[in-house]
Image (spheres, rainbow, N blue to C red):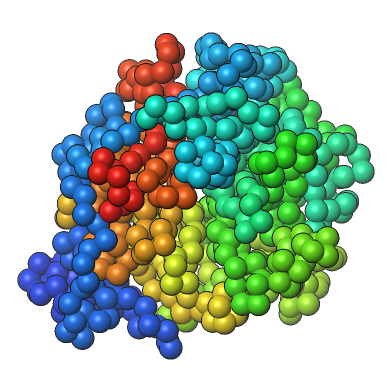
Amino acid sequence: MRGVQKRLDTGVTDNEYRRRERADSFQSVVSRRKVVVGGISLAATGFFGSRFVTEAQEKGGTPGPSLIGFQPVLKEQARGSWPVISEDYAFQVFHAWGEPIAPGFPEFVHPVTAARQAVQLGAGHDGMHFFPIDGSRRGLLALNHEFAKTQVVIGKQDPTSLDEVRAVQHAHGVSITEIASEEGEWRTVASARARRIHVNTPVTLSGPAAGHELLSTSRAPLLGTLNNCANGNTPWNTYLTCEENFHIYFGADAASDWKPNQGQQRYGLSGTDGSYMWHRHDPRFYLASEEHRGEENRFGWVVEIDPFDPTRVPVKRTALGRFRHEGVAVTEGKDGRVVAYMGDDARHEYIYKFVSSGNWRAMRAGGVSPLDEGQLYVARFNEDGTGNWLPLSREQRGLQEHFKDQAEVLVFARQAADLLEATPMDRPEWAVVAPDGSVYCTLTNNSKREVANAANPNAPNPHGHIVRWKDADDHVGTTFAWNLFIVCADTHETEASFSSPDGLWADPEGRLFIATDGGQQEGMNDQLLVADTSTGEVRRLFSSVSDGEITGFAVTPDRRTMFVNIQHPGDGDIANTDFPRIGTSPVPRDATVAIWRKDGRVVGA
Ligand code: FEO
Ligand code: CA
Ligand code: CA
């Protein structure tokens, strides 16, 4: 818990702050807590009950009608071994790990084999996107498979052969499937576009680091994508999948004299044991292998996939930098430049953005990917509510002596960001661009924070918060104004209590959908909440099963169906939950949940 550290914005201790919260009126509390930001009008951030208020309300105005009309799932309901949804909504579970990517492919049998798993849905469902084919009734679902617990997938603690390693590897990656709503149910349907992309699928690299010696591209073929966490999608209708904790798949045995160099250390490659033990059977993941030197530098990228063309090879876009990419929120900024916001999910890591060098339509017309040429920046959050985007360019002071060329800056973006004195954050997870141009980013938690700052106000920070900012010059400027949208600990005495925010999605009307990952209060499972960003109201729409994180958002164009995932239900233990109740299985399975409002209005209303 937060103890008695000083609030940066109020100068009072937490205990004193709580006493005042209980005693004072809503608006006066908010006024004291308001983070003043220079030049840009952003809503105040105070919480009381489950609400915060806007600046207009502080000046005596009244909030508009709420965007959220559903009956919330109550705290006491948000427990147990099966999901719970608002009484105004219904849901359907489908698309479970191990199901065939289309009718006719092998059905799920536990444990999986390498051959079957390569044409079945992977595990660890995470980010996803719905690409419409027939309006809101049929489309391609691109779905990330972030991780696959070995014990769950093959029924063993560690793999004992290359074939078992392959089975687990094939449970990672991305699935492209075609789904349709037929007779009121969502189903996977036959499709020439259905495919799996996994750890052994051919891929390619583009941008400034392509072909660089650090990535050993001349020695061995480029294969695979790993730990595919959150996602993005481009204005030209492609899918972006983000490689997060790639370091956990690499290892070296104690007998080797392998020692991490500085760059490997900075990316968490300690080497004594890859937690997946792949390195014992697959030399690609053996850090001491000379043949595969630099293999780890081929991961930690944003990967572009064309879901409509299964012959197109996935492309790792190196201009967006290498780090533990959580997700990528893409928008169109000034002059049609494409802008991508990205978090690096580790304690004390950074928030980044990429701005293309030109108008994305013109670049594509000229045969250049807008994700290959542009500038990568890292964020510095100043104490006064202003911020700076610092260019990760070798031309910046201090970088030339550390990096031989710009490719090295991108491969070791974390170290370049260190040198530029970016602001270390409390595990940046998803970012999303709201319709008013504000960008929201979840800082999920940071148990190791010892010194608070304005943008990370709790030390330690076990419950997380959400920061938001607005960039100058329609997303392409190098300054921004920011404030704190929600400090999760402030919700705990309310019905909208939540911790560890992770997934985010913003709808066009001003609703913010928040998915959590672990550590909920009062025995609650992970949950999906909806915030009205103009009134500050927050309600719980859906709650997960025990030990099952809620991940990913995909939405049909009419917004009448939202898909979310339940990841690692029961932490893989059938004693905790028999989710998803599809066929028979000795272990619970990740699956997708389709959610809709019973009265046919948009999801979130
Ligand atoms: Fe893959 Fe940081 O969650
Ligand atoms: Ca996450
Ligand atoms: Ca998380």
On the image, the x and y values in percent for residue 343 come to 55, 58
On the image, the x and y values in percent for residue 228 come to 59, 41
- Whether residue 527 is visible, yes or no, is no
> Where is residue 27, by image quadrant?
bottom left
Foreground residue among 72 and 238: 238
Foreground residue among 330 and 191: 191
Name the residue located 52 percent from the left edge and 12 percent from the top edge: 110
Name the residue located 47 percent from the left edge and 72 percent from the top edge: 437
Residue sitting at the far bottom = 39
- Image-based side of 363 in relation to 342, left or right: right
- Image-based side of 475 in relation to 491, left or right: right
On the image, the x and y values in percent for residue 450 come to 42, 62
| 15 to 302, vertically: above or below | below
On the image, the x and y values in percent for residue 288 come to 79, 35
- Image-based side of 516 in relation to 480, left or right: left
Q: Quadrant of the N terminus?
A: bottom left
> Where is residue 209, by image quadrant?
bottom right
